[in-house]
Amino acid sequence: MNDRLIIELLYKIADDQLILGHRNSEWTGFGPLLEEDIAFSSMAQDKIGQSLALYQMLNQLGEQPPDKIAFLRNANQFHNCILTELPNGEYDFSLIRHFLFDTAEQIRFEMLSHSTYQPLAELSRKIKGELRYHTLHANTWIKQLGKATEESIMRLQHSLDFSLPYALGIFEESPFEAELVESGIFGGEKVLKEKWKEKIGEILQQTTLRLPEWTKVHPIVGGRMGSHSEHLQPLLDEMSEVIRIDPTAEW
Amino acid sequence: MNSPSIAQLYIWLDEVTDPEIPVLSLVDLGVITAVTVENGKVNVEMTPTFVGCPALEVMKQEIESTLRKHGIADVEITVSFREPWSSEKISARGKEALKKFGISPPPAGTVFTDLELLDHAVCPRCSGTRTEIKNVFGPTLCRSIHYCLECREAFEQFKPL
């Protein structure tokens, strides 16, 4: 089994979880209602915990320990898609991002639960069950607010149109894409993207929200290769503030 | 000292409880997935309820200190997803303990696809089923928040997973 392929794959998935987990945690204390405050905080805890499990797997493959990987890399060494690093904005954007990203993530872990790389298959079987609560949460609110009032529909439609090019960046292909598919480690971004389009279409169909023609949506890519928006480095600076002041601090 | 039997080790492990739910033992919770003894060394394999469960480290420490208290000096605890946790792993005794503690136990064999299926948790106080879900996320990752329309009290359910 080619470790190089697996390492590249694990980094992008783990970085997505870590970065979106931190963005979700920024809702703690600021949710539009208490239940949403708790929901985004819980999803933050899930995602950061899942990233830790993936970083531990990377550590087993010879990479640095999890805290070093998580806190001591610069923006250009992160492989998360740009969608996950964008600032939370207003609730409508955070909700749309949560819906678009978590739908993809649930399908990704479902696919990875059949991976020929056994440790990843085992962990994915676990994570896909947990993510059902995330997509359940997203779908419930999208279905409700996507046909509620003129304002809720307008806000969500606006955020959807803004987010879709970034969402397509989730599926930016790896340089090892063909080998990953061939070796049965991962079914590939193309397959994932098609399943995702189908799934989000199925939910949005139950609302007043409209998907544009896909041919008119131009993917914003680069995140997987370390080319990020200006929003990632400030987030990393904040995340790593304590460890940079005192690398031996424990809490 | 002779190596303790596996059955004896499980009796000792039964003394260790969930740090957030002190009436529920880790054995009944179903997070201990294997116990083996090799050359006097006790290996405990466990798996978290949720991958991001922050109680895992505390659980590991308590397992170790409990076994030490019973004279086991050499303990190794490994965390594995080989046999992942699901709510089906909670024993009948564990479910009873949860109910007594005021948390609705997870329904058996639930594969839910939509919110409606989580909507009728049994109220742990009055056993009413006219209940509604308030939030799939609760005070900890493994609990959701519900409201009983019969006794008009809020309650939590241990999430089906």
Image (cartoon, coloured by chain):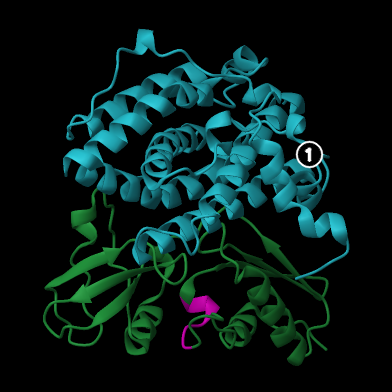
Chain colours: A cyan, B green
Q: Is residue B68 left or right of residue A172?
A: right
Q: Nearer the viewer, residue A132 or B93?
A: A132
Q: Position of residue B61 (x, y in %)?
A: 71, 78
Q: Secondary structure at mark 1?
A: loop
- Under mark 1, the amino acid is Leu
**Residue B15 location (% of width, % of height):** 58, 88
Among the 4 quarters of the image, the one containing residue B3: bottom right
Look at the image and say whether residue A100 sits in the magenta stretch.
no
Residue depicted at 65% across the width and 50% down the height: A53
**Rendered location of residue B108, percent (x, y):** 28, 65
Residue A205 lies left or right of residue A75; in this view the side is left
Q: Quadrant of the C terminus of chain A?
A: bottom right
Residue A188 visible from this viewpoint: no
Q: Residue at x 64, y 25 (%)?
A: A224
When asked about the image quadrant of residue B72, the answer is bottom right
Q: Is residue A73 above or below residue B137?
A: above
Query: Can you say which quadrant of the picture contains the N terminus of chain A?
Result: top right
Q: Which residue is mark 1?
A: A61
Vertical placement of residue B49 versus A122, above or below: below
Specify the subunit that label 1 lies on.
A
User: What span is colored magenta in the figure?
Assistant: B23-28
Residue located at (63% from left, 87% from top): B12
Q: In the figure, residue B9 lies in which quadrant?
A: bottom right
Q: Is residue A190 visible?
A: yes
Q: Position of residue A88 (x, y in %)?
A: 49, 44
Q: Does A137 appear above or below B69?
A: above
